[in-house]
Image (cartoon, grey):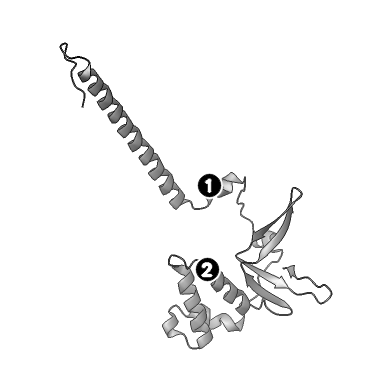
Amino acid sequence: MTRAIDSHSDGLDFQLEWADNIAVDLLARFEKIKIRQQTKMEARAQNPGQNELAAYNIRVVEQSLVDFFGVEELPSVPASLHAFIATEDRSNATDDETHKLLHHLDLAHTPKDGQEAAVDVFVQQLLSRLGYTESRRIIMIGQALPLLVCGSNCSAQTDVCILVSCPFHKTNQMG
């Protein structure tokens, strides 16, 4: 795109060469920026959440079952979930409850745009089937948690949480 400067010109050729060089330089820079952005997007796709963890100085550390849960062995799976575990395709479910839970799992596994809540609903249903709603507990989606941060009142919203109703208090507690 460079143009030779003609000694007989009035400087117009020089201006065109200068403009062409700037245009080429800008296009090259734009391509480099585009490549960097694409590389970053590919890295994020390979490691989702890594940037957020690093931004808040959070490290993921593996722990043994005993260290994490404080028990040698996890409790057995409730009988109400045996059919769920044994059935791969919801069309082969032997009962309605298993079919519904598998349907929730299918929706959560491949949510469409605007249906991200399907994951939360599946977790809610699974926790319920695992017995987390016994006693005076309920499973909530999108519950706001009031917080006091640096002297300011604010709140955080959960995806899924267990709300415990305590008969001795007028307020509910998160569990």
Q: Residue furthest front?
A: 10
Q: Position of residue 46 (x, y in %)?
A: 44, 51
Q: Position of residue 8 (x, y in %)?
A: 15, 11
Quadrant of the drawing holding the N terminus: top left
Is disc 1 placed on a helix, strand or loop? helix
Is disc 2 placed on a helix, strand or loop? helix
Pointer 1 local density, CA inside 10 Å: few below 14, some 14–19, many at least 20: few
Quadrant of the drawing holding the C terminus: bottom right
Q: Amino acid at mark 1?
A: Asn
Pointer 2 local density, CA inside 10 Å: few below 14, some 14–19, many at least 20: some
With 82 as the anchor, is 163 left or right in this view?
right
Residue at (23%, 18%) from the top-left corner?
A: 14
Distance of label 1 from label 2 (alpha carbons): 23 Å
Read off the residue under disc 1.
Answer: 51
- Kindly report which numbered mark, 1 or 2, lies closer to the viewer in this rendering: 2
Q: Are marks 1 and 2 in contact (CB under 8 Å)?
A: no
Residue at (58%, 45%) from the top-left corner?
A: 55
Residue at (44%, 81%) from the top-left corner?
A: 90
Q: Amino acid at mark 2?
A: Ala
Q: Position of residue 116 (x, y in %)?
A: 50, 66
Q: Position of residue 130 (x, y in %)?
A: 62, 77
Residue at (55%, 73%) from the top-left corner?
A: 121
Task: Residue 12: name its quadrant.
Answer: top left
Q: Nearer the viewer, residue 148 or 75?
A: 148
Q: Which mark is residue 117?
A: 2
Q: Which mark is residue 37?
A: none
Q: Which one is earlier in the sequence, the residue at label 1 or at label 2? A: 1
In this rendering, is residue 159 above or below 167? above
Q: Nearer the viewer, residue 113 or 59?
A: 113
